[in-house]
Amino acid sequence: MLPPARGVWLDRFRRVRAQTLKRVAPLTPEDMVVQSMPDTSPAKWHLAHTTWFFETFLLTGWSDYKPFDPDFSFLFNSYYEAVGPRQPRAQRGLLTRPPLSDVMAYRSYVDRHMEGRLSEPLTTEVEGLVALGLAHEEQHQELLLMDVLHLMAQSPLKPTVDPNRQADKHADQTGFHRLEGGLVEIGHRGDIFAFDNEGPRHKVYLEPFEIADRLVTNGEWLAFMAAGGYQQARHWLSEGWDAVRDNGWEAPLYWERTGDQWKVFGLNGLQPVDPEAPVVHVSYYEACAYAAWAGARLPTESEWEHAATTTPFQQLDDVAWQWTQSAYAPYPGFRPGAGAVGEYNGKFMVGQMVLRGGASVTPQGHSRPTYRNFFHPEKRWMFAGVRLARDIPLDAGFAADVVAGLSKRQKSLPPKYFYDACGSELFEAICDTPEYYPTRTETALLKAISPAIAAVIPAGAVLVEFGSGASLKTRCLLSAAPQIEAYVPIDISRSALEGARIRLSADYPDLTIQPVVGDFTSMVSLPPELQDRPRVGFFPGSTIGNFTPGEAIAFLKTARCVLGTNAHFIVGTDMVKDEDTLVRAYDDAAGVTAEFNKNLLVRINRELGGSFDVETFTHLAVWNPEHQRMEMHLVSQVDQIVTVAGHCFRFVSGERLHTENSHKFTVDTFTALAREAGWERANHWVSADPAFGVFDLIAASRQA
Ligand code: SAH
Ligand code: AVI
């Protein structure tokens, strides 16, 4: 903690003490004596107890200080066992004596001595105690208003404590922030004052999550009530449901129904419930029930703190404390301080839930994002509201495939996961590299043979393209075969499909375009309105080479079902050629293919909370003569352990992660493969070097 300059302590002491008096100014002496329930304390007791704190921890034993009244230690000690016995908490309201005037005299006496103490040089330890005493008094300033509100709420007269009090701020109706999570740090850094329970700063792992940028409103709470939220056990924790029935809860604390209208009692009196304002004075149980009803949950305190420090939050700390689903427990490495002040927070770390943020009654500047407030789950008299959070369902397929692939002896990943938005762009960039010949070779070939292909396409046909990407080669067919009336591009990359749809519809305004986002290896059904049209399939790019032969046969069978009998299927295949040309095509000098390959690790880190250090992997492209395929690998340069989706994987230095196969074909090998899947070769074309093939397949009449 960096202490304020000397003299500043005195100034701060005076300001904080004066603020307390300002908060009790609207109260009568009678208001200040009564205790409305065991959890609350009379205002007079707050005034005395905060004074007792300074007297006990900063004045006793200092110089020749004499206690104002030796009995006050018993009366105004709150819970410090090390200091001695005390008035039972629930009986603070019985203390009609000492009168308020004595308590005010006590404050003045202690203030005078504190002024003396703060005018002297202070050790760091004493500065820590002064900071604690001031933060403590600010906490009681908030408690004071909570307790006064509860007291006034019991009065049939419904007295207004603060007629000028500002209404709680409305938020803009925005939504949820999405956070990637991962390994983050929470807890105070030690550069400003913080309570001991806010540290030590430590790491926590967060799954990806969403968190609301504002608090739940009264209007939303009214909808919960109208939907029977307080009458249906299924939304409630068991203890919460008991609390609803035992206490007859049917609305937040301080809400009253008059006829059809709900009103809420606050420090500004009884007012109609403002549907735009945040809901306040709800218990943890109610917050959880609301969240369950709304299809959400409460954030953990780590999620809350991480989000609050990295994302813009509305209503961060100026309306209501926000329940978290974290139990109030010590952080790793927490040790209560020595002596009586060690009892300040640590001994309450059981059975309570953490709230974060701050409230309209919290003194300005008192709270901070690491602040851990805590209350029992059934309490409602504090200013507590709700900020929702939601889980982001992991792409179960992606997570499962990656975990399965990294668990194999020869680690491998399915190449379809290359194509997130960034991967799709990188693939387009690969196509423009001088070394990657397939795209420009196939495009030139398609242009040359497009009249022959157009001749087999029936009138009114729907063109179904698998792995369409940017749909550039498609243009060769669309331009040559205007009888194509509809186009169904199927691709796993939503971003690639969306970009292609926009560009194609500008250039082919009469074409019906119905993109399908999905995995083309599963049975894709065509949009119903296109199902009666004749179909023609298109699978360029030699993407079929990215399958193993077994997978390719399975895919070709699926495509046969999708396209139906008598359909033509135009498939592009890269042909076997010299190793040097192949290796250069998959390891371009500019490193675009290397970046494409490594982007898979970047994607895993982002979407699955992976911990790949991408820089420790190098791109490798090799020709496998046995399987007639180019292979891409990522080679770990060090021994390391990587975490993905909560699983750990060991890589030894030099170990390869196999990311892609690109099988190369001859006319015979591809014809044989197609035949196994029930396709006959109707025609084929192979370009001059570098050789690239286009096959016109037709569904054989017998079922393969
Ligand atoms: N046909 C284009 C793009 C080839 S790149 C061309 O020839 O240039 C391969 C394309 O297939 C990418 O757009 C990728 O997103 C898509 N893809 C890869 N595996 C896929 C799968 N299993 N299901 C659907 N699309 C896939
Ligand atoms: C999409 N597919 C056919 C490309 C290929 O050649 O196997 C993907 C690619 N990988 C590296 N460069 C391009």
Image (cartoon, helix red, strand yellow):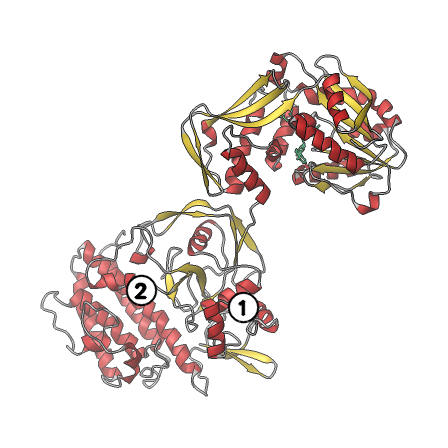
Report x, y in % for residue 381.
Answer: 42, 73
Q: Is residue 448 left or right of residue 370?
A: right
Of circles 2 and 1, the one toward us is 2
In what quadrant of the picture does the C terminus appear? Answer: top right
How far apart, in angstroms, are the residues tagged by discs 2 and 1? 32 Å
The 10 Å Cα crowd at callout 2, few under 14, some 14 to 19, many 20 or more, is some
- Which image quadrant for residue 451? top right
* Vertical placement of residue 536 versus 323, above or below: above
* Label number found at residue 348: 2
Q: Is residue 216 left or right of residue 135?
A: right
Q: Which residue is mark 1?
A: 277
The 10 Å Cα crowd at callout 1, few under 14, some 14 to 19, many 20 or more, is some
Q: Extreme right residue here?
A: 459
Identify which residue is drawn at 33% across, 67% down.
139
Is disc 1 placed on a helix, strand or loop? loop
* Vertical placement of residue 128 versus 100, above or below: above
Q: Is residue 98 left or right of residue 537?
A: left
The image quadrant in which ligand 1 is located: top right
Report x, y in % for residue 414.
Answer: 59, 33
* Among numbered discs 2 and 1, the one appearing first in the sequence: 1
Amino acid found under the numbered disc labelled 1 = Ala
Is disc 2 placed on a helix, strand or loop? helix
Residue 618 can be seen in this image:
yes
> 127 or 82: nearer the eye?
82
* Label number found at residue 84: none
Report x, y in % for residue 30.
Answer: 33, 86
- Which image quadrant for residue 631? top right
Q: Are marks 2 and 1 in contact (CB under 8 Å)?
A: no
* Vertical placement of residue 585 versus 217, above or below: above
> 158 or 91: nearer the eye?
91
